[in-house]
Amino acid sequence: MGRDKSPYRVATPKTTQIRTKSNEPDMTFTPEVWEGVLRHLRNEVPDFAYTTWLEPLRPSPQTHQNGAPVCLLSPSQFHCERIRKDFLPTIQTLLTAALGGDVEVHLGVATDRVETKEKPIPSLREEVKLSKPARSVDGPQIHSSPSASSSRVTAQPAAPGQTEAFPVETHTFESFVVGECNSLAREVAWALAHGEQRGLSQVFLRADSGMGKTHLAKAVANQTLAVSGRPATYVSAEGFTNQFLSALRTKRTHEFMRRYRGARGNLLVVDDVQFLEGKSATQLEFFHTLQHVLDAGGKVMLTGDRLPQEMHQFSERMRSQMGSGFVAELEAPDAQVRRAILRNKAAHGGVRLPSDCLDFLVEFTRGSVRDLEGVLIQLVTSASLMKQKISLELTRKVIQQRAGTDGKVRKLSPGDVIGAVSRFFALGPHQISSRSRKREVLLPRQIAMYLCGRYTDAGPAEIGKALGRDHPAVRNAVSKIERGMLEKPPLRYQIEALGEKLDAMTKSRAQ
């Protein structure tokens, strides 16, 4: 399909499952069909490439007609060309599978009033069979591994609409960048997966959001399967909670326990255990699950944003259980790791990053791995939207927008940002943190969450607390605002205007 030179190596397996509500092939293109295609692509390409190139794609409204060509809109001509070059064949194949027949795909550039279409692309005839979804307590059971037909690495789903599956290729030990800040955590995770350390049956990784603990957790599950063939189950604590409550409602607790306690020698990986704080019934089930897995000769990996003894809303025996194994921490990436991460993500995203730009990013971008990815995405997106090459001047502007004119980390508080946003939209701070879902309140709240992430040192949990929301809601809001800035110039102008006000606040405090 002419993909030899693509940096992404998007794989289209012989059996591809694209799930819609009815799960029946239909020649009518719907939003659910496109969401299924995106789910598959997200599992096949690096996170950076997906966020930069695939996520901004939007179907044209005229596409939603029976038998009509599928028209996908890009935010710019540059973006459109990259999609055509690197992703179009796979998109066509997946749409052919989902719609049950050959599909004609057009690419266009979205503007305020006009859609500029490219020449039609010949439809592909590569056959992709649809397989039926497996059943589970709360949504479909998703298997991910290098060989999808024989995988026993199970990524358990959370609530409907939340995907817990993970792209195997991007969450491996090989793709994890190691330095002094995380070497101990990486080594103990490797030892757990390989069974190299006698007596090592439980590991707890502590790290702030975006430092790589989820990457290591999923790498352990992948490596365990690859090395020993033993069953390995990954689930977020939120997913565990949702499924347990669903099992209670439907009286299917035996199925739930069988899934997580599993066979002898199983590996159980539970991510972000702080989500279980204050949930006494779920904590009790979680405690017994850990006990069962360990007593049966299995292994456990847990991750959290605090050490076990600091999670005061857990019972004493739960804190004791979580802290009874090896506890390791991941720190913020040092300069060496920042350089390697930026270089790798740029290469995987098909982006040429000049050495002077890389040096500048390493020097002035601090914080989590997610922060590094965020600044790189903003740099690439800015270059695309302004039809410029990535240069030191543009890199400097992006850093100034995100980290202040002198390149130093901002020290505003969430309250400062919330106050500025409230004044800008003529709202009271209490309105932004209320439960209101009215658009005139919801959008400013989402903007406040986005700007708190850019202008303060607060993590998602702290930002959520300041605005009366949980950290998943904060992450969701940030993603919506980032997408909106690409698609809606008025929103981008509002963010820029608020950014100028926050810049001024930061400068005045530095004087």
Image: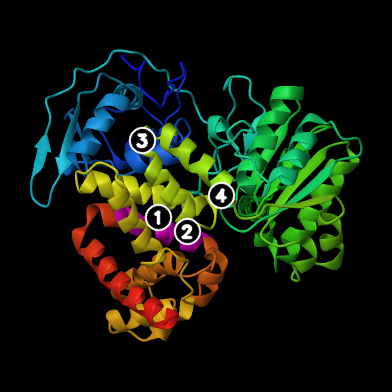
Residue of label 1: 479
Residue occupied by mark 3: 351
Is residue 292 highlighted in magenta? no
Query: Of marks 1 and 4, which one's residue comes earlier in the chain?
Result: 4
Circle number at residue 475 = 2
Q: CA distance from mark 1 to mark 4?
A: 27 Å
Which kind of residue does numbered mark 4 sit on?
Answer: Ala
Is residue 477 one of those drawn in magenta?
Answer: yes
Dividing the picture into quadrants, the one containing residue 234 is top right
For the residue pair 212 and 303, the one nearer the viewer reads as 212
Expressed as whole percent of the image width and height from the top left, the position of residue 331 reads 65, 55
Contact, CB < 8 Å: mark 2 with mark 1? yes
Decide if residue 89 is on the left or right side of residue 408. Answer: left
Which residue extends farthest left?
A: 114
Looking at the image, can residue 258 be seen?
Answer: no
Name which residue type carries label 2.
Arg
Q: Residue at x 67, y 28 (%)?
A: 152
Q: Quadrant of the N terminus?
A: top left
Judge depth for marks 2 and 4 and give the one in front. Answer: 4
- The residue under label 4 is 335
**Pointers 3 and 4 in contact (C-beta within 8 Å):** no
Could you tell which of marks 2 and 3 lies nearer the N-terminus? Answer: 3
* Amino acid at dot 3: Val
Tell me where the magenta segment starts and ends, as one range.
Answer: 472-484
Q: Looking at the picture, does residue 180 appear above or below residue 408?
A: above
Q: CA distance from mark 3 to mark 4?
A: 21 Å
Locate residue 73, reporting x and y percent: 21, 40
Q: Nearer the viewer, mark 1 or mark 4?
A: 4
Marks 2/3: CA–CA distance? 25 Å
Badge 4 marks a residue whose secondary structure is helix
Q: Residues within 10 Å of mark 2 (few under 14, many from 20)?
A: some
Q: Nearer the viewer, mark 1 or mark 3?
A: 3
